[in-house]
Image (cartoon, helix red, strand yellow):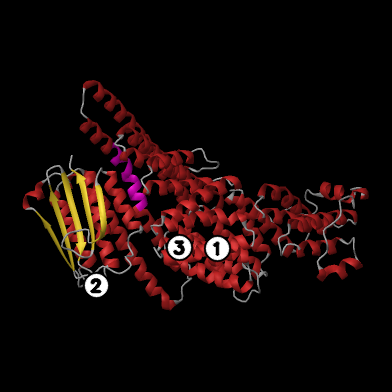
Amino acid sequence: MRSGPRFGEYSWGVIFALLLRPASGYGQAGPLPPVPDSLRAVVAAKPADAATLLRVAQAYLEPFDSVGVVAYAQAAERAAYHTRQPLLAGRALDLRGDYYRQAGQPRLALPLLRRAGELLATAPAGQQAQQRYHLGMAYGDLGQPGRALALYREAGRLGTADRHLRADIYNSRGLVYYRQHRFDSAVVNYFRALRLTPGLPGTGTESATLGNLGLVYLRQRRWAEAAHYFRAGKALEAAQGDTMALASSWQYLGQALLGRDSLPAALHCLRLSERLARRSHLANYLPDAWRLLGQTYQRLAQPDSARAYLPRAVAAQRQRGAAGMVAGALHALAGFYLQQGQWALAEQTARQIATAPGTNLGWQAQGWGILRQVALHRADYPAAYAALAHERALQDSLRARDNHELTEALRNEYETDQAQTQVQALRREGEVLRLQSQRQTLATALGAVVLLAGAGLGLGAYRRRQLRRELALRTRLSADLHDEVGGLLTQIAMQTNLLGAGLYPPAEQQAQLAEVAATSRAAAAQLQDVVWGYDAHNDHTGSLLDRMRDYAHELLGSTDVSVVIEAAPALTARALPVETRRAVYLIYKEALHNVAKHARHAQHVAVTLASDGAALHLTVADDGPTPPHPPRASGHGLRNMQARAAAVGGTFAAGYGTVPGQPGWGVQVRVPLG
């Protein structure tokens, strides 16, 4: 690969233009900001020297003072033109361009960094490596990962002696892979960066890399690992006195603890993040802090506090005008209104998501999901079906887009036969997704025609509702395989890649292999659940009971907790709609998982399945004592069970003492059979 343009290859015109630039252009700018105290003597001795002015500009980088960096970098560039020093002009351009990139303006940075590359074509290898790295960062921020990775490779080859630069390159490569959702590759690069960071004085690279590792695990909902790396990064940032990074780390740590249902600890972290952001005037950090604080208060069953923060987060994001950020705040507010039973406000807020600036396909799909729940509450099944169709179509488009982006990234990055094989496989997968989308579109259109014809022929509401459910069920099959099994397979790929890269010492490899085996078993079990859930041969209560007993033995068989499942003998032959059977089983699994996780003093779990002819009733309850501060009223599991029951038109209740005769945690579900 070429190392970049050489002095005599094509840039003579640029150099002549530089050397012949009239001297009158120098010194025409306005007054410069004051010189830092540490450099006053140097500037007094050489006030018009390009190298001196460049040192002042670099000094202003530490407090990230935009006026000082830009003004002195421009002055250094003009002085370099005046004194015919192209390398110093290139360094000044590179400094200014990288400042704009760090300030979130990569489009302003790109032309400056390109010009810097032409002027630095004959510079020492270390300076060229820095410029390639800065240019690669700009391309990465502009969503061009292929160019970014190519420039990182050039920078790494030119800067082999610079351990700090190599660590930064690995960290930035990890960011590229993170943006592509290639989390295994991101983690490998982050660990390589961490191998180089010990002993590097006060660079911030190690803390940044630890924080990026935490973000990967946060994205994968691996809350414990995320919290571990955020804490490690936060400790380094505190030692360095980096207030901006600390505000971010406290916020991410709070988010990880929120995912673990450690709500008081999460609240403490988020309050600290907000306080740091206010004290240091970091206005961009406040909207997300307010959103997370509102969601934490919501889960702590403090709606008044949640109502104080969530609308404030929406207003602040709108005022800030950052593309894509308003939608997240709107979704959190709509979810709050939904939980509070304020259906009209939930619908009104959810409809704003689609028109928010920079809203992506994922947020749009979640907005339609909220509209679907509102329509189901109102028993407006045509509107619910239409919302479901929009939601699934957006999710299909999102998967297809991600698949296309990953294919293009692989095409740009790899030039080997193995890479071509991977690209072809991804293309085939993309074709399968396209055909599936076409079939789903045809099925939706056919369903709409049948529904209209049925209305004309006087078909009852029962048959129309059943048809809509069956069509929606087909569209969910591919999504379930992707979401429930795909995540575990990605985790297996990440773990095996890390083992293959030799990043674990020999003492830890056996433990990692055991974790891979456990994850593989979990993926196989999830796949069996998905297949069982959609197999028409299992559409009766007897199959559901067998599956429930198997799961109870698998989960609690090695513990001291006994599980008794009771059902009337006549119920075993009763037919069950596929959606109802699947929803009841998944609610049962979540309820039993709660027992295993939370009911530490329970010895007996009673499970009852009964029918009153029109509906199926499920109760799950343990005999553990009621704690003084019940911990389970706001977890993800409770919301998932409630959503699954509502999706099939059922009702759900949970809490301590909910089931008569059982003092512990209990769940009661009623779902219609017709």
Task: Name the magenta segment's main secondary structure.
Answer: helix
Locate residue 442, reporting x and y percent. Answer: 34, 31
Kind of residue at disc 3: Ala
Secondary structure of the residue carrying tag 1 is helix
Say which residue appears at 44% left-offset and 54% top-offset. Answer: 304
* Residue occupying the point 59% across, 72% down: 238
Tell which circle, 1 or 2, labels the residue nearer the N-terminal end: 1
Q: Furthest residue to the left? A: 570
Q: Residues within 10 Å of mark 2 (few under 14, many from 20)?
A: some
Residue bounds of the magenta highlight? 471-483
**Mark 3 surroundings: few (<14), some (14-19) or many (≥20) residues within 10 A:** many
Classify the position of the N terminus by image quarter. Answer: bottom right
* Residue 55 seen from this side: yes
Q: Secondary structure at mark 3?
A: helix
Q: CA distance from mark 1 to mark 2?
A: 37 Å
Q: Residues within 10 Å of mark 1 (few under 14, many from 20)?
A: many
| Disc 3 target residue | 256
Looking at the rendered structure, the kind of residue marked 2 is: His
**Residue carrying label 1:** 273
Residue situated in front as seen by the camera: 349 or 409 = 349
Residue occupying image coordinates x 80% and y 63%? 56
Q: What residue is rendered at 42% in x and 78% in y?
A: 507
Q: Which residue is mark 2?
A: 601
Tell me which amino acid carries mark 1: Ser
Q: Position of residue 35 (x, y in %)?
A: 83, 64
User: Helix, strand, or loop for circle 2?
Assistant: loop
332 falls in the magenta region: no
Q: Left or right of 392: which side holds 322? A: right
Nearest the eye: 74 or 34: 34
Looking at the picture, does residue 90 appear above or below residue 458? below
